[in-house]
Amino acid sequence: MKKFILLIFLLFLNCSVFANVFEHPQTLSNITGQLPELNSITCKFRQEKTVSTAKLKSSGTFKFVKNEGVTFYTTYPTTFTTTYNSSEYKQINDIINAISNKSYSKIEKAFNFYFDKTQDNWQLGLKPKSNHPSAKYLKSIEIYGKSYINQMIITTVNSTKTTIWFEK
Amino acid sequence: MMKKIRIILIIVFALLSILGICRLKPLETGLLQGFLNSEHEELIQLSDKSSSTIGVLIESDDIDKIEEIKNNLPNSENFDELIELYKSHPENFITPHRRSLLKNKKYNELAQESLEQLYNPLGIFIQTPDKDPYLFVTDYIMNLRNPYFDNEIREFDGKYYTKISLPASEIKTLTNLQKKNPIYLTGTPVHAFVTSQKSAFEINIICIISMFALILLCKKYFNSVKILIPIALSIIFGFGTGFFTALAIFGKLHILTIVFATSLIGISLDYSLHYVINKDIIKNLTVSMITTVTAFLLLTLSGIELLKQIGVFTSFGLIGVYLFVVFFLPLFKLSPKHKTLTYPNIPTKIVFASIIILSVIGLFKIQISDDIKTLYSPPKTLLNAEILSRKVFPAPQVSFITVKGNNIEEILQKEETITDNLNSDFFSMSRLIPSQKRQEENIKLVNELYTNNLSSYADFPIQKKSPAPVSFDLQNKFMLDDKTSFIIVFDKDAGDINLTRDISEIMKNLRLRCVKIIPIIFIMYFILLSAFFRPKKALKIIASPLIASIFAISAISVLGIPINMFHILSIFLILGFSLDYSIFMSDQSSKDAVFISFASSFLSFLLLSFTSFKLISSMGLMLSIGLMSSYILSLTLFRDKI
């Protein structure tokens, strides 16, 4: 499951207001050329999980090392490290590497893609294909970016919404 | 007088038939059931349980098509209902690790673990934190190692695969669907289905060939095929007597009993031909019947269910054939003209020396195998499916622990006591649905946690409710009977029962027991033959089957085939056939009947040795070698009489 959510976090900058991206289905071949190059990066992140009426806020440092994996160093409200480059997450890593190397075939099998672009700002939407196992848990992923990714929103079927902001 | 006896025989046969039909039950086809008795009941049940499902491996280049293909298949069992139960009762289902933290009141440690899960950027909640603030359900489900939860999609060698389990009853549907869908079928029911279909086809072909060969032999020898009518009737009467007697005694017969009892056909043919060719053969016929029946009756003392059945079936079948030949064949007024066969002058010393040398060489090469898996070589397609399935979804070797109790609650509690102290990973009914007692404990522990830690842990609203123990019926998956469940341990040595190891051990003991019976039978033969013939002649008569049996075992060993239980069992059949060859060969006028009987039996068993089912083919090979050597030996041993 986690592997399908993983694809996402890659970088920063402002977020413009877009229309609903899910009104713009696109083929991956059309999107690929318009997405930024994904290189190793370390930045701050803020996260907000909305569960029912509660908002769970956290923040820390995000690190992505190309061909190695991603790590979230959460420092608030508690300190812990979540690493996705261990052998346990090998499949996730494979997918991250596929993204960073612009080899999207694995993601294409799992998601329907939506894309919209206004000037320099772009918005990518991913919805699990209805017959894919991840559709049981994951509703959608939205990624906002400009020259880098700056925000992503993960919505699950049990109405949990996780928003992560990546900030330099 | 003869007429009265005939009427009595017909009445007895009719009564036996009625009694047998009344007790008739479907044939037992499980291999283990033929060898194991009531003390091995758990082993049989576990074996049945662990091999009762078909593994369906779905393959596709496109991950989307996996679901499409799955939609074409019968519905597999899903555990959504159980997941919903977990979600609605988060306090009831707690992993051993978290239970330990709760029992030791390590609330801060537990809270930290929960927070890490809660704030994990890519983490998911199976139940939301407002209903399950410490994410007990998510932790519980993530820690379930459940071989029954199928549907995971894996990528292997550039293709996508998923595996589902379906009941054995779907085998016909699945084999049909396999023609149109890229699926691989694995598991015992598939092998049993394919092998039985193939074996049935092969055996039918062999029966047809053997029948034509026999017709041809009779045509050539008697210049008529009418002779086959009384012979066929004697076979039917003998086989019927054996079958109905065995049914009346045992009720349910094993399929291998029928396979072994086919020797009756050969012996029935033997007896009938001897009578047709020479009416003065009654003494030899009686001696042959008494010795063979006594030897086969000894099998009933073996303690092995299959041997008991073979013993009763064959003994009473032989008595039936004998009575038919003596009391009914005279009615046919048979005195057909026949040709006289000429026999090659076999150099006795060379034959003996060759057989002895080959026997000695073989005995040095002998290898024993009690591994039940060696009795079966799967067809290439099924073997490839099994290999692929294991590569894509590697399965650990398992052992089992059985748990007894008077009711489900007692069984679950006992399972928990055992698994709490188990160092290996396991899967059990109590792992999916804990006992009421354990659930109550969990609820109490969670309530204590909420009282002591929740206010400092969660700054979000919690939906509180009054939890209570729940139940879920999983008995058909984990119960062997009303009072016995089983735990699957993912370590081949950690459980009490390892099916492969234990069955092989039992097969070894049975093989040894059979080996011990063989000399007793030979001694019994000698004693009985000595009552009718001089000891020297008795010794000469049993020399042929004895040497032939040793030679057959040696020849199999020379071919590099490990000796198994069925090779040993084949010796009993070699004895049944070849003792007759020796007894009748001592009578000049019976040699042609012996040859026709030998030729037809040898051809049948030789053809059987080419069948695809290894168990049958190994018996066929052993019997054809045994019969050939026994016939040649009897021909040379009694050459002076011929």
Image (spheres, rainbow, N blue to C red):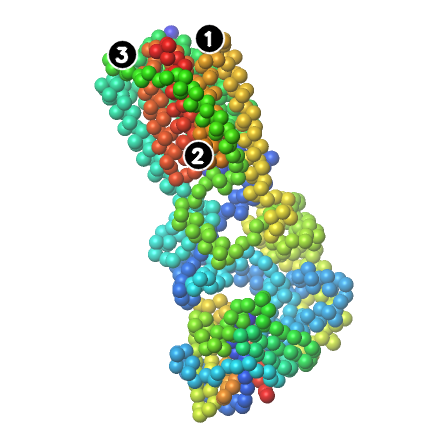
Using the image as rendered, state which of residue B91 and residue B144 is in the foreground: B144
Label 2 amino acid? Leu
Label 3 amino acid? Ser
Q: Is residue B502 left or right of residue B544?
A: right
Q: Is residue B294 left or right of residue B224?
A: right
Q: Earlier in the sequence, mark 2 or mark 3?
A: 3
Q: Marks 3 and 1: same chain?
A: yes
Q: Is residue B164 left or right of residue B404?
A: left
Across and down, in percent, residue A131 comes to 44, 68
Name the quarter where the C terminus of chain B is drawn: top left
Q: Is residue B50 left or right of residue A131?
A: right
User: Alpha-carbon distance for marks 2 and 1?
Assistant: 38 Å
Residue at the (59%, 83%) spot, across then down: A42
Q: Nearer the viewer, mark 3 or mark 1?
A: 1
Find disc 1 in the rendering and name its residue.
B533
Query: Label 2: how many residues lie within 10 Å, few (<14), some (14-19) or many (20+)?
Result: few
Find disc 3 in the rendering and name its residue.
B335
Q: Earlier in the sequence, mark 2 or mark 1?
A: 1
Residue B188 showing in the rendered view: yes
Residue at the (66%, 61%) spot, across then down: B95
User: Alpha-carbon distance for marks 2 and 3?
Assistant: 45 Å
